[in-house]
Image: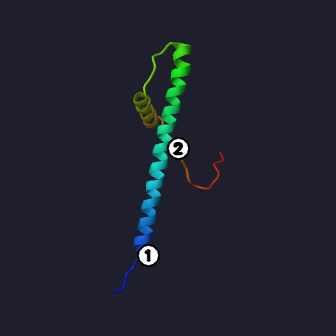
Amino acid sequence: MIKNTSNFDGCLQALAEMLGTFTAGTLYMLFGCYINVLLWNYAVVSLFGLPKVTFWQMLCLMVLLRLLFPLKISFSKQSKEK
């Protein structure tokens, strides 16, 4: 019986890369949310008298802003000259 493991290894490597990317993105988002909460509660509350926000409120605000103003990411190596 001949085993073809090269296809399985490729799928396993792709799955590991996707899981690593998802984990790194999630940690980056959670850390960024925590930093934004600290900055908001320190600066905005004392300067403008707005109410403090919780972690979950800031997370929802960040998701809402990302949906309203998406990032334009380009992976092409061509220079954008206009």
Residue 79 lies, with reference to residue 63, above or below; the image says below
Q: Is residue 61 visible?
A: yes
List the single residue furthest toward the bottom. 1
Say what amino acid the circle numbered 2 marks: Lys
Structural crowding at the residue carrying mark 1, measured as other residues with C-alpha within 10 Å and reported as few (<14), some (14–19) or many (≥20): few
Residue 49 lies, with reference to residue 11, above or below; the image says above
Q: Which residue is mark 2?
A: 72
Contact? badges 1 and 2 (CB < 8 Å): no
Give the structural element (helix, strand or loop) at label 2.
Answer: loop
Task: Give percent across and percent down for residue 24.
Answer: 49, 48
Residue drawn 52% across the image and 44% down it: 72
Residue 46 lies, with reference to residue 80, above or below; the image says above
Q: Which quadrant is home to the N terminus?
A: bottom left
* Mark closer to the observer (1, 2): 1
Q: Which residue is mark 1?
A: 6
Q: Which quadrant is home to the C terminus?
A: top right
Residue drawn 48% across the image and 43% down it: 27
Q: Quadrant of residue 4?
A: bottom left
- Could you tell which of marks 1 and 2 lies nearer the N-terminus? 1
Task: Give percent across and percent down for residue 78.
Answer: 62, 55
For the residue pair 11 and 65, the one nearer the viewer reads as 11
Marks 1 and 2, how far apart in space?
A: 35 Å
Position of 42 with respect to 65 (left or right) is: right
Residue drawn 48% across the image and 52% down it: 21
Residue drawn 41% across the image and 76% down it: 5
List the single residue furthest toward the left. 1
Residue 51 lies, with reference to residue 37, above or below; the image says above
Task: Give percent across and percent down for residue 20.
Answer: 47, 54
Q: Is residue 70 visible?
A: no
Say what amino acid the circle numbered 1 marks: Ser
* Dot label at residue 23: none
